[in-house]
Image (cartoon, coloured by chain):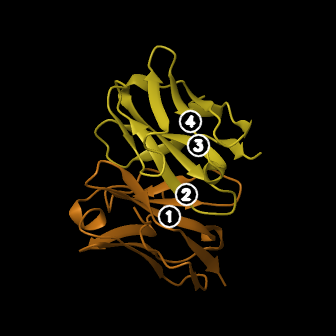
Amino acid sequence: QSALTQPPSVSGSPGQSVSISCTGTSSDVGGHSRVSWLQQTPGTAPKLLISEVTKRPSGVPDRFSGSKSGSTASLTISGLQAEDEADYYCLSFTNRNTWLFGGGTKVTVL
Amino acid sequence: EVQLVESGGGLVQPGGSLRLSCAGSDFNFRNYWMHWVRQVPGKGLEWVSRTDPAGTVTDYADSVKGRFIVSKDNVKSTMYLQMNSLRAEDWAVYSCTRVLDGLAGHFDLWGRGTLVTVSS
């Protein structure tokens, strides 16, 4: 299976909002609500930001939010901060009982 | 400390085999789905495999199906990945992560990974 489609990079100034899209098909993103988002900074393990499209674990700032429309899920960072500079990955369950990552998006804070 | 620690990585020739381990500490291992994820240094994440809390259900990415076998020992709180017929493209850092049964996609704990290099 091909990776879910994410933009390679997005950027924004501190305080701005940025959104990262994650496009799949009806066999994955569009087929259910099992979409997660992870954040990874260089040299560290991924950190869970969002699960089940919109659920934010305790400890994750509320400036991170998730949504989905059809076969495209989105992660929005509201009020961008310098510490948000990182790589972001979406991850979706599929109808083959597997999980599928997006290609990753590098967020740069200008 | 609640943690996952991978081990068993190393250098192996193409066509060779390697067994990775993922040891869990300070949590009830038997309540969790366990997954393997790999990452070529500097590249993106790739989901590899998973097993259910009991270790009886297993699923694999197409890229490793038929070559890799995942297993889980709840007594030892350890998951394994038996990697056979290794190819150059299997070179990556292999990490494990957990998901509490019933919390779909809640990958809340990750190990630091173990590097697998496939080269002659």
Gap between marks 3 and 2 measured at Cα = 10 Å
Of pointers 3 and 2, the one earlier in the residue sequence: 2
Same chain for labels 3 and 1? Say yes or no: no
Residue B95: image tag? 3
Badge 1: residue crowd in 10 Å (few <14, some 14–19, many ≥20) = many
Circle 2 SS class: strand
Gap between marks 1 and 4 measured at Cα = 25 Å
Residue A66: image tag? none
Of pointers 4 and 2, the one earlier in the residue sequence: 2
Gap between marks 4 and 2 measured at Cα = 18 Å
Q: Where residue B105 sits: x, y (%)?
A: 37, 49
Residue A51 visible from this viewpoint: yes
Residue B28 visible from this viewpoint: no
Circle 4 SS class: strand
Is B101 situated above or below B91?
above
Badge 4: residue crowd in 10 Å (few <14, some 14–19, many ≥20) = many
Badge 3: residue crowd in 10 Å (few <14, some 14–19, many ≥20) = many
Identify the colour of chain A in the image: orange
Residue beneath label 4, please? B83
Do the numbered discs 2 and 1 sit on residues whose CB atoms are within 8 Å? yes
Residue beneath label 2, please? B45
Gap between marks 2 and 1 measured at Cα = 8 Å
Circle 1 SS class: strand
Q: Where residue A80 sits: x, y (%)?
A: 55, 77
Do the numbered discs 3 and 2 sit on residues whose CB atoms are within 8 Å? no
Same chain for labels 1 and 4? Say yes or no: no
Same chain for labels 4 and 2? Say yes or no: yes
What's under tag 4, amino acid-wise? Met
User: Which quadrant, please, contains the N terminus of chain B?
Assistant: top right
Residue beneath label 1, please? A89
Q: Where residue A3 sits: x, y (%)?
A: 44, 66
